[in-house]
Amino acid sequence: MRKVMLVDDEYMLLRGLKLLIDWESLGLEIVNTEQNPSLALKYLQDNDIDILISDMNMPEMPGPEFVAAAKKIQPAMELIVISGYSDFDYVRAGLQQNAVNYLRKPIDTDELLATLRGALDRLQAQQQQHQIASLAIQTQTRTRTLLTTDREPEQLQIIQALGIEFATPTTVRLIGVLNPLPPKDLVNYLRVIKAVKGFYTEREDFIIVFQGTTDQLNIFINEAPHQIGVAHRPFLIGAPIKNVGQLRTRYIQLRREIARQYFFETASGLRMMLPDTQESVSSTLPSYSEVKKALDGIDLTGFSIWLTHQFDAMKQANASDLLARQFALVVLLVLSDRLTKFDDKAAIIAAINHAKDVSDLKGQLQWVAELATEQGTQQFSRNVLAMRQIIKKRYPEQLSLAAVASELHLNAVYLGQLFKQEVGRSFAQFLNDYRVDVAVDLLRDSDLDIGQIAEAVGYQNSSYFYKLFKKQTGMSPGDYRKAGVLSS
């Protein structure tokens, strides 16, 4: 039974209204009558009402004021206002507060019945919308739980509830749609596609569980709302899922791919993700030597074009954001070798390791390239050139400034000051930097372990090498090596 409350300062009208129609036959029950609008508002604070019928002319409180206050307390409640006034402006004030209808005194029975039936229809539609919304929320919650939990009993129960079946000719996949605008259009589309077993949002992105044939998948992609389709938003189609055990793995793969798309600033397009057995190495990280050769004699404009091309190639080869950062660090090492003064290297390394996207990386490297251009081409004296050549040829040895000065028959203090003045770094700093540059290539191109590489570049103490390498690159030697393969 729907609950009705009557409010009118005239007792006889309240009594007559209760007897005017058969309320019960309509599924209605008058649960309260009030002559004082203040008491009516107090009642509404503690009791749910479906339909409120109120007079618009009460001495204790103006009708429009009461209607507004009542609607504020229970926004979903249906309102019917009654008045003997013929002044439309006064009545309209009640209607603007979402009153269902305006009934003139004396009340016509047929008009009252029609008005009440209209209110009941709206309440029924509202209830159905709430039920649909509740079911949608349950489905989204189940879908999220299905993909984020590793508890198989719970997964199996949710799979049954969502109607997912693995042992059929159709294929189960996860689909990601990045930041669809407007999201409401995509939601409406997903709700009418039978192959969509569930979906939910993670921030602005949609994660969709899809089960269908290849033809159904193609139709799903091609008939997506125009402003959301692959021409406007990235669509990521996950690899086929053969059993429950693959669900979480595929979900993690999809999340990583979403993060990669944001990092490389993908604006649109379709990406079909491959099964594990087909994922393969696409390319390798350019070495320090290769980057140094590529940048020899290049101007700022050429550097910008080259850098953009390198990141575009990484994007096409499905590089991870970690590998892109690693590449940026190699470029930084090459550029910093050209600088006679570079006090911000540690800050640039930190910025590279925390860059949110490729544009951030390019901006940091472009700034360093501009700084190198401003400082001009380095011109070294004969003695400094000789010191640099000794370091580059004999870096694995236990070199020291004193030993090199003695070999060149020069004063060590004088030679150290001259080297720092021209190179911008002390002899020891330059030696350590060069050893790390060589170690970068060895980590990429050799199978030597970290201790062997440390010894190969001139360090007997692996811990000291580890410390220097991390200071230079922001990564440990082991992490650098792990990230050194460009894979999908």
Image (cartoon, rainbow, N blue to C red):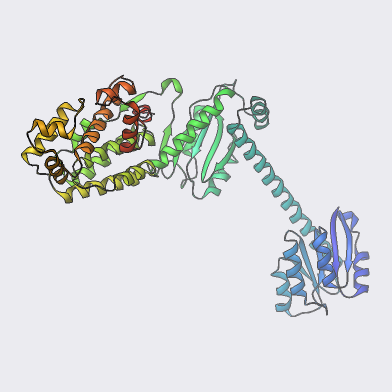
How many marks overall? 0
Q: Position of residue 322 (x, y in %)?
A: 38, 35
Q: Considering depth in this image, is 434 or 15 the residue closer to the camera?
A: 434
Residue 310 can be seen in this image: yes
Location of the C terminus (image quadrant): top left
As drawn, is 177 to the left or to the right of 66? left
Q: Residue 37 location in percent, x, y?
A: 83, 72
Residue 479 is drawn in which quadrant? top left
Residue 473, image x, y percentages: 32, 37
Residue at 51% x, 46% y is 204
The answer to whether 335 is drawn above or below residue 154 in the figure is below
Q: Is residue 212 visible?
A: no
Front residue of 189 and 351? 351
Q: Nearer the viewer, residue 352 or 414?
A: 414
Relative to residue 264, is residue 413 drawn left or right? Answer: left
Task: Please state if 252 lies on the left or on the right of 116 as rendered.
Answer: left
- Given residues 452 and 34, the one toward you in this image is 452
243 sits left or right of 100 in the view: left
Tell me residue 52's x, y (percent).
81, 64
Position of 301 relative to 19 (above/below): above
